[in-house]
Image (cartoon, helix red, strand yellow):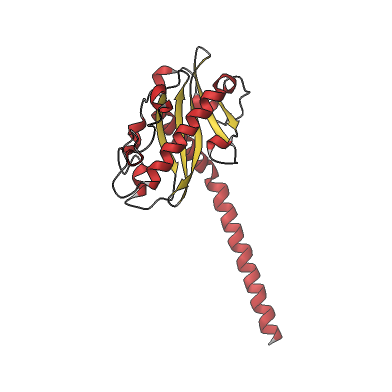
Amino acid sequence: MKIAITKNAKILALFAVACTAVVSLTFELTKNRIKQQEQKQLLSTLHAVVPDDIHDNDMSQRCVRINDPLLGSSDDQLAYLATHNDQPIAAAITSVAPDGYSGKIFLMVAMHVDGKLGAVRVLKHQETPGLGDKVEERKSDWIFSFNNRSKEELESSRWAVEKDGGMIDQFTGATITPRAVVKAVKKTANYFEQHKDTLFQQANACEVEQ
């Protein structure tokens, strides 16, 4: 009996070692490809929220780490900075809507130095398929309703979804999700307005390998 248990234990140990080796090898073989895909997705999102023709720097190579309650998380967020002739143009800021229907909604919010809202994209969420997931650009065009909103609109008391008496459409069957996004965008805009003068003076913290 003891011999059988010892034998099985050795087999399990060898199996665990083999599995660990396979996982480690797979990670080593794919990590560069994963990193390339992440960088490709980042560039795609940055191009979507900040037009290439208004800046002349590589935003993916110029960013700073920021931390503020207005950004919806105690974790560090990133602000990717757009400049033209070294002059500040816009920032694409990652932030979090903590009060989505199914949890946190991770956003990228592009703000221009004149206070205009450029565009918004949802980076990650767990909202209900068919309802809350309409915040995704591939599910509906709702997220495009934030494009090029003025500073005056952002500062208006009507910056809310229509159900709350606001100016932003919500989609049928789900109010909590769009309400959370609208609130988070407003808070991110407030953060940018308070810190835009110092953001562009900070040392680059996010340079990545080419």
Count of numbered badges drawn on the protein: 0
Q: Quadrant of residue 3?
A: bottom right
Q: Nearer the viewer, residue 115 or 135?
A: 115
Residue depicted at x 62% and y 23%: 202
Q: Quadrant of residue 15?
A: bottom right
User: Is residue 124 shown above or below 18?
Assistant: above
Q: Is residue 77 left or right of residue 126?
A: right
- Drawn side of residue 35 relative to residue 133, left or right: right
What residue is shown at x 57% (from left), y 24% (from top)?
195
Q: Is residue 80 something one can see in this rendering?
A: no
Image point (59%, 53%), residue name: 24
Q: Position of 202 compared to 44: left or right?
A: right
Q: x, y (%) of residue 175?
A: 36, 46
Q: Position of residue 198 (x, y in %)?
A: 60, 21
Q: Visible in this render: residue 64? A: yes
The residue drawn where x is 57% and y is 37% is 69
- Lateral position of residue 197 relative to residue 173, left or right: right
Q: Check the image and name the residue furthest to the left.
A: 172
Q: If the image is split into quadrants, where does the N terminus sit?
A: bottom right
- Of 73 and 139, nearer the camera is 73
Residue 115: % across, % down: 45, 21
Give the x, y percent position of residue 149. Answer: 37, 26
Task: Classify the position of the C terminus by image quarter.
Answer: top right
